[in-house]
Image (cartoon, rainbow, N blue to C red):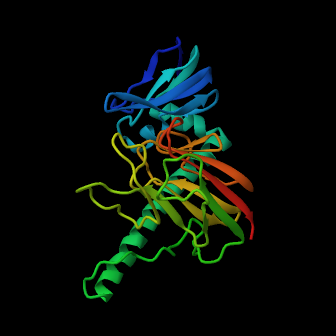
Amino acid sequence: MMEREYNEGDIIIEEGDASDFAYQILSGEVEIFVTRDGQRVVLGMMKEGEFLGEMGIVDGQPRSASARAKSRVSAAILEREEFFNLISRDNVSAYRLISRLCEHLRKANRMIAEISVSAEDVASRGGALSPPPHKVADPDGSTGAAIALRLDLFPLSQKPAPGLPAEGINIANLPFSVGRLPLGNEPLPRRSIDLKIPDSRPFRLSREHFAFYRRSQGICIVDLGSTLGTQVNGELLGHDFSNDFVLLKRGENKIFAGGIDSPFTFRAVVEEA
């Protein structure tokens, strides 16, 4: 393992590069961004103690975002073996990585279940296409039909309209998914999306962006593999960050979909039912 210093503005990771190393931020702040249609879209900030590029080490995929030093940054550069040796000695990091991999497996299982249900529904209707039911298994393996908590979703900006009215909606059945309304000849999402919101190029919303699920501890929000990620109460979710899901707190939760300056912002309120 070696350490390297970066000056403000230095590029640490370049979008599209091979995922040869993971980085642990030792000091300073790092900005995560992507370039879309010639414009820089800032996804979020990472700070001391957090890892950069760890999922690339695990899945071998090219970098899906860039990282640059927002201030003077010191970082440890870890090869694959060094990274796994490090987290094997760090219970918190190991638990986080295992939890994330488990969530990826749950996502795959949910997708398979939804595709299967959809195919059976089409077959039962003699080939007529209709939306699949929403009550597929959640991360705890139960259905979203009965929840102990009330969840209401409101827009925090004008952008979600007309998909989401100003007075908000009560989400009675979980899981509940949010995504972009496909345009033109775009393929439909692989899963049924409950709330479809219009967007225009360059897109900030993905066709499958985030979803609410019930867990034994409460209600969580999961990034569905969106292109630009999801921020919830300041915590960054998505492939480029340390988590894919987070438990919503009681009361108000702020959600930014598609970057920290995205116009698609929401307020999710969790209360006793």
Q: Nearer the viewer, residue 96 or 175?
A: 175
**As drawn, is 40 to the left or to the right of 215?**
left
Write the residue at 47% across / 60% down: 107
- Farthest left residue in view: 185
Q: Nearer the viewer, residue 176 or 222?
A: 176
Q: Is residue 173 above or below residue 248?
A: below
Q: Position of residue 67 (x, y in %)?
A: 47, 26
Write the residue at 52% across / 39% down: 241
In the rendered image, which quarter is residue 166 located in? bottom right
Q: Is residue 37 above or below residue 201?
A: above
In the rendered image, which quarter is residue 236 located in? top right
Number of labels in the image equals 0
Quarter of the C terminus within the rendering: bottom right
**As drawn, is 151 to the left or to the right of 180?**
right
Q: Position of residue 245 (x, y in %)?
A: 57, 52
Q: Is residue 143 above or below residue 243?
A: below
Q: Position of residue 129 (x, y in %)?
A: 29, 78
Q: Would residue 86 be seen by someone viewing this image from the given angle?
A: yes
Q: Would residue 22 be seen by someone viewing this image from the given angle?
A: no
Q: Position of residue 257 (x, y in %)?
A: 51, 46
